Amino acid sequence: MNRVFSGIQPTGTLHLGNYLGAVANWVALQENTSIDRIYCVVDYHAITADYDPKDLMKRSVNLARDLLACGLDPEKSALFVQSQIPEHTELAWIFQACTSYGELQRMTQFKSKGDTQSFVSAGLFTYPVLQAADILLYDANMVPVGEDQVQHLELTRGIARRFNTLYGECFPDVKPLLTEAPRIMSLKNPEQKMSKSSGEGHFLALDAPENETAKMIKRAVTDTGPAEDGEMSPGVANLFTILKALGATEAHTSLMADYEGGSLRY
């Protein structure tokens, strides 16, 4: 039987990008009886940036609650907090001895995140090794990911193969389960992915009041009409993506017809 592993950081309330990009897919996978499912609140990963220990504990519990509210069923999927299983960090230390410095240097996410932090910890640098341990500890052979995580998964495969060559066959070959989930962008800057770390106004929290969500949508960056080259601007495209992903098919079709007809100006 195939086994899926995936994790999510407790960095605050779930937002629309989290839900459409990951959680909705996790819930959908529960209908596939040929797959074992293991999902994890990866609180150790969250400490690679500034954090408050007491707040992190609260956020971990709240995230687990939110995942259950989104449809994860404990009868169908395992759900736990990473720090409750010490073997994650034990295996990560062993894997660090099977990972080259050069491989970690090539991780593009480290470069992009490191550029935004005043203090860049060694934990941020070795983050992908712990991620590999998270996956391989449970002999998972499939990981549902977006394209931005494929590089980390390739490293995981490399670590597993190197370990198996040195010490004997132990870990499976991991494959990405590429999701068809839409890439939801920031409402303030549609050139970047929706993220809580970018600050207020950039994301739509799932637990926000309806009136607050409406205000944020109305303030989203769009444009003043179709571009000269006929291409839809990133901000407008993002709103259309959200509309379609949330199942508003009729509204999406109608508004798209207005846009293509030149009557949808803002």
Image (spheres, rainbow, N blue to C red):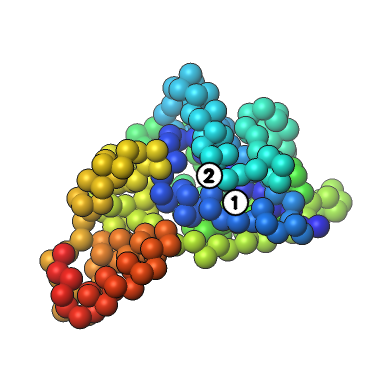
Q: Estimate how packed mark 1 is, as few (under 14), some (14 to 19) or many (20 or more) residues with alpha carbons within 10 Å.
A: some
Q: State the image quarter where residue 67 is shown.
A: top right
Image quarter hosting the N terminus: bottom right
Q: Which residue is most to the right?
A: 168
Q: Position of residue 99 (x, y in %)?
A: 65, 47
* Alpha-carbon span between mark 1 and mark 2: 8 Å
* Front-lying residue, 210 or 18: 210
Identity of the residue drawn at 22% across and 75% down = 258
103 horizontally vs 240: left or right: right
80 horizontally vs 232: left or right: right
Q: Which residue is most to the top?
A: 54
Amino acid on which disc 2 is placed: Cys
Amino acid on which disc 1 is placed: Val
The residue identified by callout 1 is: 27
Q: State the image quarter where residue 116 is shown.
A: top left
Q: State the image quarter where residue 49 is shown.
A: top left
What kind of element bears circle 1? helix
Image quarter hosting the C terminus: bottom left
What kind of element bears circle 2? loop
The residue identified by callout 2 is: 70
Identity of the residue drawn at 74% across and 51% down = 36
Identity of the residue drawn at 34% across and 38% down = 208
141 horizontally vs 110: left or right: right
Q: Estimate how packed mark 2 is, as few (under 14), some (14 to 19) or many (20 or more) residues with alpha carbons within 10 Å.
A: some
Tell me, yes or no, whether the two marked residues, 1 and 2, touch with CB atoms within 8 Å: yes
